[in-house]
Image: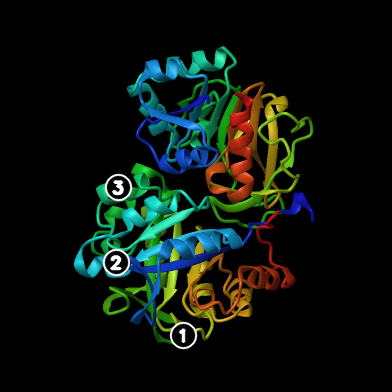
Amino acid sequence: MSLMNSMANIRIIARLDVKGPNLVKGVQLEGLRKLGDPNAFAKKYYEQGIDEIIYIDIVASLYERNSLVDIVKRATGDVFIPITVGGGIRSVDDVREILRAGADKVAINTAAIKNPALITEVSKKFGSQCMVLSIQAKQTGPGKWEVYYDNGREKTGLDVVEWAQKGVELGAGEILLTSVDREGTAKGFDTELIKAVSGSVTIPVIAGGGAGSPDDIVQAVKIGKADAVAVAHILHYNKYSMDNIRQAVVEAGINTRRIV
Amino acid sequence: MKTIVIADYGIGNILSVVRAFEYHHANVKVTDSPSDIANACTLVLPGVGAFGDGMKGLRNKGLIEPILEHCLKGKPFLGICLGMQMMLDASEEFETNLGLGIIHGEVKIIPDTGINGTHHKIPHIGWNSLSPSETSNWNGTILDNIEHGAFVYFVHSFTAVPANTQNRLADCFYNGRIISAAIQNNNIYGCQFHPEKSGRVGLQIIKNFINLS
């Protein structure tokens, strides 16, 4: 290993969708199944060497509440890696509360669409590194994707690439890009979508939606140029372990964190 | 059991820093009181966000004097991320802002291209490996027993450039660009990475720091 040639190391992130006290998983963000205590999963993935954890409260923006504060507070005793929290975050006060609870970053989707100035407020107040713009993308034609919210139910008319670029201008530090079409299908990432966004912004892009095998992750990085990948299905259902994933990524010649 | 005093000046996620010390059964006191900080044996200055805001937070709480005094006495000190950057003389973030001047040098933006001219993303976010700088020896420091090349978690757009290379304890490389990962002057340390977010390696670094006191 050459230390002189350290390119950015690709991050492998576990995405935990939460409804009330439970980890849930759906297909294309619908048809939810309860899987258990989200912190038990977070702790397991941490011990297996996951690089980061993302918690998303998937009903918060529908019911205008957030059940993640307590979950995150408990997680900080067991999980010593970066934690991102999303779902139902609407104001600078919401961000402050969730950061005080132990989150490092917030992922904002609906509120950023309704009030783009929030992106700037959050990044000025807490630093751009903690302002993750979450984008739900649905394909509308060849090379075209539209921004959605409320778990892919509501359309906005916004073009995904243009919205991502606007987000960077407004002060976002990262983009969490989820393909609504692929989410929960385990059919692989929408690499064209990832490539379109990653190639048009200067900040890191976390690709999500569709990982079904370690090879899918390799494709997201090699073809899509993702800076990080968010996975759920393949870990939650024990289809592959972190070791399997890490090994496949390393064998593909991709730089990633080495667990000592 | 010694108490670890953590300065709280209203910025960022302090709970994770507290939990990392508690993991090693340390007594932790989170405070914004100048007298508590003046009386601290072991002091931690965490922080994320903008340099100017961080210095303003310290100034408004009256914490600059007691922090400088603590360091002058040579008592154990650890600045994390923005807390490390504020240890330098000044930063060019937004406009030039004066820092604490505990370790001489400046804080500069990471160039958005690598040494070979290829573009890379800023902020520098993610796991990167620690290597000793030319003059450093990790024995007896907070990096004692840490393997060369061990990975820790970074998230930042600016990097400290110490005037004296003797103060560089560890570096990392981003597309060939050198980044000051850890700095040291005797018992006074700064980490650009987040030890509290760096898994087992980070927890070991926290433990090493506790053991200095």
For label 2, the SS is: loop
Q: Which residue is mark 1?
A: A185
Q: Of discs 2 and 1, which sits in the foreground?
A: 2
Q: How many marks?
A: 3
Residue that appears at 57% across and 62% down: A50
Above or below for A49 versus A185: above
**Left or right of A151 in this view: A232:** right
Distance between mark 2 and mark 1 Cα atoms: 23 Å
Instruction: Give the SS element for disc 3.
Output: helix
The dot on residue A135 is none
Disc 3 marks a residue whose amino acid type is Glu
Name the chain under label 3.
Answer: A
What residue would you read off at disc 3? Answer: A97
Quadrant of the drawing holding the N terminus of chain A? bottom right
Mark found first going from the N terminus, 3 or 1: 3
Q: Which dot marks residue A20?
A: 2
3 and 1 marks in contact (CB < 8 Å): no
Q: Position of residue B18 (x, y in %)?
A: 45, 38
Q: Residues within 10 Å of mark 3 (few under 14, many from 20)?
A: some
Picture coordinates of residue B36 (x, y %)?
40, 19
Residue at image point 46% right, 58% down: A174
Identify the residue at image location x=63%, y=57%: A8
Chain under callout 2: A
Q: Disc 2 or 1, which lies upstream in sequence?
A: 2
Q: CA distance from mark 3 to mark 1?
A: 34 Å
> Which chain hosts label 1?
A
Frontmost residue, B134 versus B175: B134
Q: Secondary structure at mark 1?
A: loop
Camera-near label (3 vs 2) is 2
